[in-house]
Amino acid sequence: MSSRRWRACPECDWVSALPVLKAGESAHCPRCERVLVHRHHAPAQKVLAYALSAFIMLLLTLPFPLMSFSMAGIFQEIVLVDAAQAMFNNDWPILGLLIALTIVILPGIFLLAVLYLYGAVARRKTWPGVRLLARMLSRLKPWLMTDVFLLGVLISIGKLMNMAHVNLGLSFIAFCLYVLFLVRTVSLVDADWLWFALCHEQQPPPQAHTGATAASQGIIGCPVCGLLNEQQNHHCLRCEAHLGFHSNFRLQATWAFLLASVVLYIPANLYPMMTTVTIGGTIYSTILGGVIQLVDTGSYVLAVIIFTASFVVPIAKILVLSYLCLLAARPRPMATKRRMRLYRITEIIGRWSMIDLFVVSITVALMQAGVIMSIYPGAAAAAFAAVVILTMIAAMVFDPRLLWASADSTYEPLNEQERQPHYGL
Ligand SMILES: [Zn+2]
Ligand SMILES: [Zn+2]
């Protein structure tokens, strides 16, 4: 048995032995070209520095005003958490909680967990709870939406600029740095390196060989730490994570989440996203109504961004995932790399649909209970948030290995070199 570490590709299930990597190098799956592992320069020091900076910036962001708004002698100033607070005040506590979780609470937990874990590695100590926290890290990543919120802040400024003076507050710079450092920390946190540093690595099951799928050998790659396990194990030998449900169960669950999101997509578009109450009357604006308003006021760029994020992306995501589910149920050989590209795009773009919800929460926070004008969130905001979350879960639950099942019999590695993961710089 070689001393090299083995991996089953999480997307196509192909088993390969990892080469020894230098800093800056990546190993790609020989079959689907997914990055299996990437080595960073000085990972522990960099992650600790960025995570600590991000956490300090988060603390500096919280107490000071993020932005202010003045119109006809009325002045309103908000701090970051007011965007969530506004939803609580308007009887949408679930939306308030969602916003607080995605921009402050979960990123805060993520950063503290990173500091604790990398601190343990740097000090070469086994501190309690490291496995639990390390398992949590990869699950938290998709739900950290500070970058989406930052775009939401910029769009809100663009929207409100036409009718009032909008100024950025003292904590805006700190918030931008918090977002920047957090995004950098997320990109540098490397589950493969971390698990090796925390718990080393056990040998793969004796029957494992490269150049075939893991399923065909009765083994399975751990979805959290990557270690190869026997298929009959319910939990990973190294990180104790659940080794995952059967692919067919995951396919059914994906359909269920997609169906739920299609149902909720109807009220998300029919009901108002935002209600504006002025002396002249009440205006209800739906998602598309909001886009038309932006076009009318000449804000074409904002109209395109909101239309893409709120209308095109959710529909495209539902259609693409349904198409992939159909392909998985009736597998056909070839064209699988194109399917994988589609799958990866749906995973990446889904979270950006949250922009409109963030714009609504910021606008509501800035303009609540005004004398001249008040803005309230509508029922569509909750339905739309549910659509975004359900489609995100659908993409996570979908098992991309199903797309490759049919390719198994037709795919023959060309030579020994192709059986090994190749380097990428
Ligand atoms: Zn692969
Ligand atoms: Zn594991």
Image (cartoon, rainbow, N blue to C red):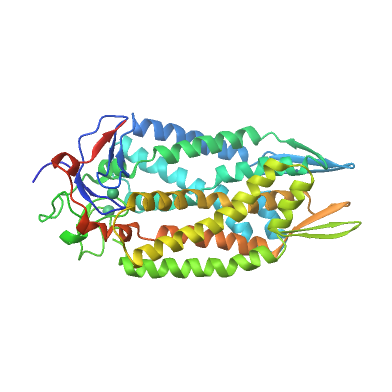
The mark tally for this picture is 0
On screen, residue 221 versus residue 151, left or right, reads left
Rendering coords of residue 115 (x, y %) = 41, 40
Q: Is residue 100 visible?
A: no
Q: Which is nearer the eye, 83 or 59?
A: 83
Instruction: Using the rendered view, name the quadrant where residue 43 is placed.
Output: top left
Instruction: Using the rendered view, name the quadrant where residue 63 is placed.
Output: top right
Q: Which is nearer the eye, 161 or 341?
A: 341
Residue at 68% x, 57% y is 287
Instruction: Using the rendered view, name the quadrant where residue 330 is placed.
Output: bottom left
Q: Is residue 281 visible?
A: yes
In this rendering, the answer to whether 17 lies above or below 397 is: above
On screen, residue 177 versus residue 347, left or right, reads right
On screen, residue 10 versus residue 285, left or right, reads left
On screen, residue 115 versus residue 402, left or right, reads right
The furthest residue to the left: 1
In this rendering, the answer to whether 326 lies above or below 106 is: below
Q: Which is nearer the eye, 390 or 188?
A: 390
Residue at 40% x, 65% y is 326
Residue at 46% x, 58% y is 320
Rendering coords of residue 167 (x, y %) = 75, 35
Rendering coords of residue 14 (x, y %) = 23, 51
Which quarter of the figure is the C terminus placed in?
top left
Rendering coords of residue 20 (x, y %) = 20, 34
Residue at 33% x, 53% y is 336
